Amino acid sequence: MKSVPRPVIVSLASVVVLELVAAGTVARARRELSEQELNARIAQESNPTRKAKLEIQLGELKLAQATAAYDHDQFEEGRKLLEVFRGYMKQAWDLLEKSGRDAGHKPQGFKELDIALRESARRLNDLKQRTPLADRGGIETVSAQIDTLHSEVLSALFPGGEMNESSPARDAKPAQVPNSTLRPGDPPS
């Protein structure tokens, strides 16, 4: 009986291990839920934080659909989908706000909404840049509403902190530069 060289055994074992790891990773990969599945889970969910997370996912799905509509020059459909998206994000915020949770101490749900709103604002800005000027109205309106909502979420996460939109440090005027530091040719302040 011939023996198999040791490097061949190690090589085959490595291939088997890599295949098992890859299969496990694929099995654990998060599957995107459909609109119907998300609606069904939202209807069944009683925990406001988990329900808000599902609302966020549904909102992100609607934003993707709105983006696709705008990309196919279906501006009216896109506007409607953007309003639905905004509604889901607002609903997620309302659920979190009414849950009675202190976002500063228990930020679960609030952080996810913060991240989703930040990403959504970026995606809306990208969409606005590639949409004809005459058809940007709906995007700009929803974008402004999302920015306002995001400010409310940040205020809840960072009460009295620097992230608070009405913070005095944010409203402070920059220090005046004395005229003695001006160089020749600089305009006076």
Image: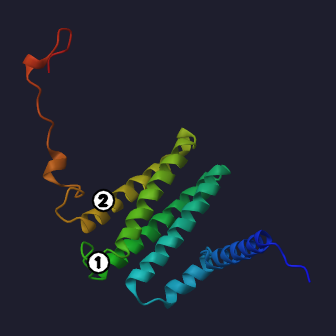
What percent of the width, then of the height, locates residue 169? Answer: 15, 49
Residue 126 image point, x, y percent: 52, 47
Residue indicated by mark 1? 106
- For discs 2 and 1, the disc positioned in front in the rendered view: 1
In primary-sequence order, the first of circles 2 and 1 is 1
Residue occupying the point 9% across, 19% down: 179
Helix, strand or loop for disc 1: loop
* Residue 56 image position (x, y, % from top left): 47, 71
Which kind of residue does numbered mark 1 sit on?
Answer: Lys
Q: Residues within 10 Å of mark 1 (few under 14, many from 20)?
A: few
Q: Nearer the viewer, residue 112 or 143?
A: 112
The vertical placement of 124 against 113, above or below, is: above
At label 2, counting other C-alpha atoms closer than 10 Å, the crowd grade (few under 14, some 14-19, many 20 or more) is some
**Residue 40's quadrant in the figure?**
bottom right
Q: Which residue position holds label 2? A: 151
Image spot of residue 75 (x, y percent): 60, 52
For this orientation, the residue located farthest to the top is 184
- Residue at 17% in and 13% down: 183
Of 14 and 9, which appears nearest the observer?
9
Instruction: Indicate the quadrant containing the N terminus: top left, top right, bottom left or bottom right.
Output: bottom right
* 99 lies above or below 32: below
Write down the quadrant of residue 135 in the picture. Answer: top right
